[in-house]
Amino acid sequence: MRILGIGLSHCAGVCLIEDGRIVFAQEEDRFSRRRRQKGWPALSLEHLFRQHRLDESEIDLCVLSDLQASRRVPQRLRAKRTITVHHHLAHVMSSWALSPWTDFDAVSLDGGGDFSSWLSFGAVRGGKLLHWESNCGSRLDVKRKQVKRGILSRRNPGRPFGTYWSMPAVVNFGMVDRQGIAGYEGKLMGLAAHSNAERFAQSGVRYDGAFSLRRRGRYTYLETHGHPKLGDRDHCVTPDGQRVPLAEVRRLRKQERRVLCEYELSRADHRQLAADFAAMLQRRTDEALIGLSAANFTPGGPLVVSGGTFANVLSNDLLNRRHRLFVTPPMGDEGLALGAAAWGAYVSGIERLQPTHLYLGFDA
């Protein structure tokens, strides 16, 4: 049986499973040379079908991630059957695909997915997904293997946790590439080692971002408060005093590749402020994730994590001291194609996947 997973979020890609074996996985930017490529991964699909000498009609099941992104993309393959999967269920299924355990708890956490979700929980026992739910109110009907949106779907999950790193990185500190493409939260995190949280408190810069925990049924959820950006919530105030609305800042970056920001990291004082802020935010992130794990999971138990937040190696180190931790290798949206294919395998009755080796993509 051939199952093809297609990730449509940023870091778009494809993954092919044949008879329970993961035989190909590729991110689109390997071909397009565009970081965090989003949308239909045409070049990866072209390579896949050519390399494996396949026709679209030979794909038994095609699985698209995400639910909402799949509605916006007009392209479809001539597969025998096509289904879609929730962004965060795909994250959890990428964990299921690669986890060294068949009994584990799972959590995904990132900068946003379907229906404004950014957090989900799962419970896997004997390789079977016994429970899955997201903070957008979506949950898994275990018997039918379908995602349902009930009364809780009206819940507003709040600002995504990941934006408390991504927005300051972009708007405050200008951490983007020459094409204006973001995704450098890790560089901001790296600056945390050059300062401490107390220094930011003394800086006088306005910031009201905060996190808390709240019990909602089976799980205790993480909640966000305040605004992710430092200073003016609605404008980017450039070093020369311009006050530019954030919508215009985004338009300039996306359409004209002009990057406006509030601090120039080439300046030592601005770089120090970035380090001060990063140290403070890292401490709050650590406290939030440790609190989340303590409220939901047994100490010493197996915990498998996914979502871009878990690229944070400092927080992962703390979690690893409390749990038997497995960080899904493609933890970010680059893993959604794998998660989509894994969901296709799971609903098809395949209980365990076999990665053939670590080199699953295009061989340059």
Image (cartoon, rainbow, N blue to C red):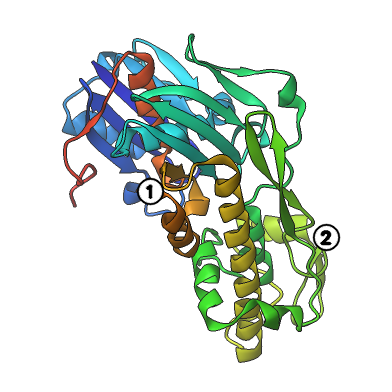
- Residue 358: x %, y % from top left: 20, 46
The foreground one among 340 and 175 is 340
Mark 1, other Cα within 10 Å: few <14 / some 14–19 / many ≥20:
some
Q: Amino acid at mark 1?
A: Arg
Image mark for residue 283: none
Examine the rendering and report whether any part of residue 326 can be seen.
yes
The foreground one among 9 and 32 is 9
Mark 1: secondary structure = strand
- Residue 27: x %, y % from top left: 35, 44
Question: Residue placed at 77% from the left, 58% from the top?
Answer: 227
Please indicate whether residue 151 sits to the left or right of residue 52 in the image: right
- Answer whether labels 2 and 1 touch (C-beta < 8 Å): no
Please indicate whether residue 208 sits to the left or right of residue 54 in the image: right
Mark 2, other Cα within 10 Å: few <14 / some 14–19 / many ≥20:
few
- 221 relative to 50, above or below: below
- 354 relative to 198, above or below: above
Question: Residue placed at 43% from the left, 41% from the top?
Answer: 12
- Residue 262: x %, y % from top left: 71, 75
Examine the rendering and report whether any part of residue 256 can be seen.
no
Q: Quadrant of residue 118?
A: top right
Q: Amino acid at mark 2?
A: Asp
- 329 relative to 180, above or below: above
Query: Disc 2 to disc 1, how far (Cα)?
Result: 42 Å
The foreground one among 50 and 220 is 220
Please indicate whether residue 208 sits to the left or right of residue 20 in the image: right
Question: Residue placed at 41% from the left, 31% from the top?
Answer: 93
Q: Quadrant of residue 67?
A: top right
Q: Which residue is mark 2?
A: 234
- Residue 317: x %, y % from top left: 43, 61
Circle nearer the N terminus (2, 1)? 2
The foreground one among 21 and 181 is 21
Q: Which residue is mark 1?
A: 324
